[in-house]
Amino acid sequence: MEWLAWVILIVVGYLIGSIPSAYIVVKLKKGTDIRKIGSGNIGATNTIRAAGRGTGVLVFLMDMAKGAIPTLVGLAFSRDLAIVAGLSAFIGHLFPIWLNFKGGKGVSTAFGVALAMYPLYALMCISLWFIVMVATGYVSLGSCCGTSLMPFISIFTHQPWICTIVFFIIAFLVCWRHRENFRKIKAGTEGRSFRKKS
């Protein structure tokens, strides 16, 4: 019956990942649709624009939990199931059934998956995210650097191949979701945080 655990956890992981934390929190606090504010993204950064830094931190933690919970449950069965359940939650965040499959960029949820699988390595990724974000002022660049570090850590620490593949998929999708941010960085129109424009 191991296959049943896989089916259930993949489906449940997707549904948990699909919970639109930012949409719900901003709607409850402000009575507005976050998709009509700022970048329109249902993530922590846009939540800060819509409802303040404290609310943004709350959404960040909620989105991380969406990735961590299915992954931790999966670890009770096997590492392979855990990483696949985490990927399912991540996909759910990107393509939530509740919002017509138009979701966020997946950074917080990706970190939740990594934190549940490899806490120390995840902290290294989060540290890189923070350093790049503060050094450049670009949240988007820090996010992509942080998530892109994880698959290389997986390779160099000889983790199971399925984990490396999943982390590469996650990194690719996070960077792909930030493609518009990269265009703005190139054009000099991307907004900065922690640093004033020169």
Image: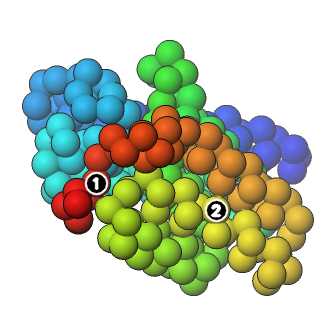
**Above or below, comparing residue 45 to residue 160 in the picture:** above
User: Which of disc 2 and disc 1 is earlier in sequence?
Assistant: 2
Report the Cα–Cα distance between label 1 and label 2: 21 Å
Q: Is residue 153 visible?
A: yes
Can you give x and y, in whole percent of width and height, for residue 89 in the image?
Answer: 59, 44
Residue drawn at (22%, 57%) of the image: 197
Quadrant including the C terminus: bottom left
158 and 98: which is toward the camera = 158
Q: Can you identify the residue that label 2 sits on?
A: 148
Q: Secondary structure at mark 1?
A: loop
| Helix, strand or loop at mark 2 | helix
Pick the front one: 145 or 156: 145
Give x and y (percent) for residue 164: 80, 64
Callout 1 crowding tier (Cα within 10 Å): few <14, some 14–19, many ≥20: some
Which numbered tag is attached to residue 192?
A: 1
Q: Residue furthest top?
A: 100
Of badges 1 and 2, the one in the foreground is 1
Residue 143 shown left or right of residue 51 in the figure? right
> Circle 2: is it few (<14), some (14-19), or many (20+) Cα within 10 Å?
many
